[in-house]
Image (spheres, helix red, strand yellow):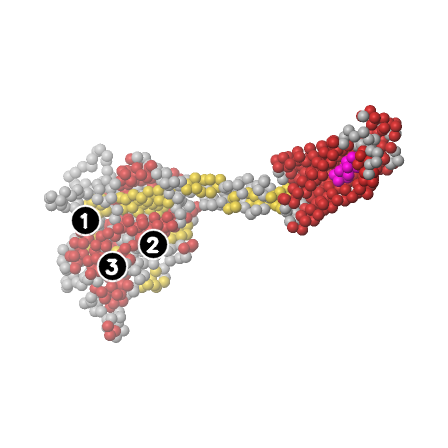
Amino acid sequence: MIGVLSSIYSNKIYQKLSFNVRPPKTTCRLFSLEYYQRLQAFLFAIEEFNKDPNILANVTLGFQMYDTCDISHFDLQGALQYLTDSRTSIAGTQCNSRPLFTVTIGATISYNSIIVAHVLGTFRYPQISAFSSVSALSNKKVFPSFFRTVLSDKVQSYGLSQLILSFGWTWIGLVALDSDYGLQGIQPIKEEIVKVGACVAFIEYILLGQPDLNAPHIVRTIKESSASVVVVFSTDVEFAVIINELQKLNVTGKIFIGNAGWSRSVLLSQSQYSPVLSGSLCLATEDFVVPGLSQFLANIHPSTTKTATWTRMYWEKVFSCQFFPQNQTVPSVNPVKMCTGLERVEEVKNNSNYIASLKSTYHTFTAVHVIAKALEDLRSCKMGEGPFSNGTCADIWNFKPWQLTYYMKRVRLNVNGVNKKFFDDNGDPSRVYAVVNWQLKADGTMTQVKIGNYNFKALPSRALTMNSSLIVWNLGSKQVPSSRCSDSCSVGFRKAALQGKPTCCFACVPCLQGEISNQTDSLNCLRCPWDQWPNPERSRCLQKPIEFLSYEDILGASLVATSILSSFIPAVIWILFIHYKHTPLVKASNYSLSCLLLQSLSLCFICSLGFIGYPDHDRCLLRQVSFGLIFTLCVACILAKTIMVVFAFMATRPGSSLRKWTTLRVSYTIILICFFLQLILCITWMSVAPPSPKYNTETKPGLIIVDCNDGSTIAFWAMLSYLFLLATISFIVAFLARKLPDSFNEAQFITFSMLAFLSVWISFIPASLSAQGKYTVAMEVFAILASSWAMLICMFFPKCYILLIRPEMNSKEKLMMRNKEKI
């Protein structure tokens, strides 16, 4: 004898309890086509296995069925009746001899199954449920004799979380039944969502203890939330109340993700719910239809069954008609199709709702199959080879409930041609979930189209397989809807958390200068290597362009041309001086020092070329040194000229002993000493901290400015200061001696040349500090050329004017006359 805790109704009338009077009797309502077909599937399975000669030959399976209306105390009452061997039942077979109560099928609701399992498990009576999926029932320490033919909600919850995350949704609302079924189902989903960085926009519960099930509050939350995706872990009856409230407030455009509790619901597939539910995705149990069940159901007729009341309800549900008593006429207002009893199943057997309602019967049929196979294994035991003490076997006519539990744990069924163990160690089956999409049909109703599978036994990367092209979203869209608290941050931006908001709510902040982000929704920006720089989109690093004063650059080429051309001018003047070296003007200008000065000025123009071109190690090492030494030679020549002018004037006095100091040897000695001191300074500089190339990425972040590091700033400025000192001394001495009455006096020219020289280099200091990159080098080249030209013009252009334009002035008389005029 099999005990069955089942129901025909899927809802009850809510009764408010005051606890000061006897509670009213619970009244059931809403006849369920699915529940009735499950009942018929059970009856069909009993007939099939009783007729099968290969299973339980000469043993008849009987049953006692208790209508529980899915109410917990009714399920418990039925289980207690089985344990106490009560013969009271609503439907059952009649046996001549006392049957042996073996196992209970049910309950349907997980919470009810937990209550029954606590009672039956105490006595080790096996219990198998076709629809209780709460994960707590997998705990064999608490529920040692509980089995089920449906997968655990824990598996389902992981599958739902994978389904959600596969579409990139990160802002999800959660709605669940306020029961063990809902709480234990929604919690793993929440954990998995949060684990991968997605966020829960809200979590609301369907309160079974309230008349409105908390529907108004839940719907307001859904409407006001920016989350487009809502996971609903519920049964279809309770969820229907939420949908009705959604329709009242005209809430559409939400995508509902559902569990197996309503994934194939015939109730929710009606056209009235399609504006809200079309486009939904659900995990559903395997969609097998029990072979032969359709024909069995086709033979049901209200006039031939014992439960005529239920059958008439079934008939009315299937054929959308209504039976009326003979003396009652069909109402004229809202006329209803009248049932004749002549309707045929062929009229509706292709109806999607009718087919969908049959698919849930597979688990009920499988439950009977498991029981029959376990009993057959128990009966087939050979004495001495049994699993119990001393190899004993159980007696098929008088066995203990724990002995059947032993065989049920190990039962093997043929699934898809493979004979394998049906239950795992937790009493759960090894099954695969189907992923179904709720799509609108032409008649306005909805059908569940299979688009993939979820196999929790597979590798995580292969557990969920889908053909996304088959999905039709709400309002017929093929575009995957978005559900994010904040729009994705594109490349070049990073996510910045908003205070007081979940991690999925963020602002997109551009990457800082020199940083990139090469993927969307990047948490951090990556800094480019020192020699690279972000592209305008800041999505990748590009090689920085190198900047230096090159020969190919227009500015560099101009300076090169100017330097080369300028270097020829002193050479031309030198040739001119050689040609006129015996003339009074050239002799008065100290011919030897003038030639050396002209050669130095040519080198001054040429040394500027060392600052143009790529600053490699050799160029950096030599360019400042060559500049310092050549300019020192040049200024030393001018200083020697200045000193010679003073000595020459003083030597003209009677009895002066300074005449011996007016020789060329003294001039060259002055030049050599000045040059040698600068040489010592430069050698020390090169030995201690020589200049070297440097790569400047700070001045212009988008460029690599290649320049020379001076090595020792002190040495560099000491070199310039020494030059400044020589020029200053020359200027002061020349300025003081500018009016000396001597025919050889060129102190005025020296004064102007040194004044121009100092002015150029004093101006160079602030100009170079304000310039950047190659323009700093260009400023120094310009200063070299400008100071060289200043000395060349002030010192030699007046002489060239006389030599070439006014040759009549190039005589001793004219020079003497000019000096007398000065006196």
Three-letter code, disc 3: Val
Say whether marks 1 and 3 touch (CB < 8 Å): no
Q: Which residue is mark 1?
A: 308
Secondary structure mostly taken by the magenta-highlighted segment of the chain: helix
In the image, is residue 213 part of the stretch drawn in magenta? no
Which callout, 2 or 1, points to the residue nearer the camera?
Answer: 2
> Which element carries disc 2, helix, strand or loop?
helix
Depth check: 566 or 352 in front? 566
Q: Which mark is residue 784?
A: none
Whether residue 589 appears in this view of the structure is no
Q: Which residue is mark 2?
A: 155
Say whether marks 2 and 1 touch (CB < 8 Å): no
Magenta range:
634-646
| Image position, residue 105 (x, y; %) | 23, 57
Q: Which residue is mark 3?
A: 142
Left or right of residue 262: residue 531 = right
Whether residue 110 appears in this view of the structure is yes
Three-letter code, disc 1: Ala
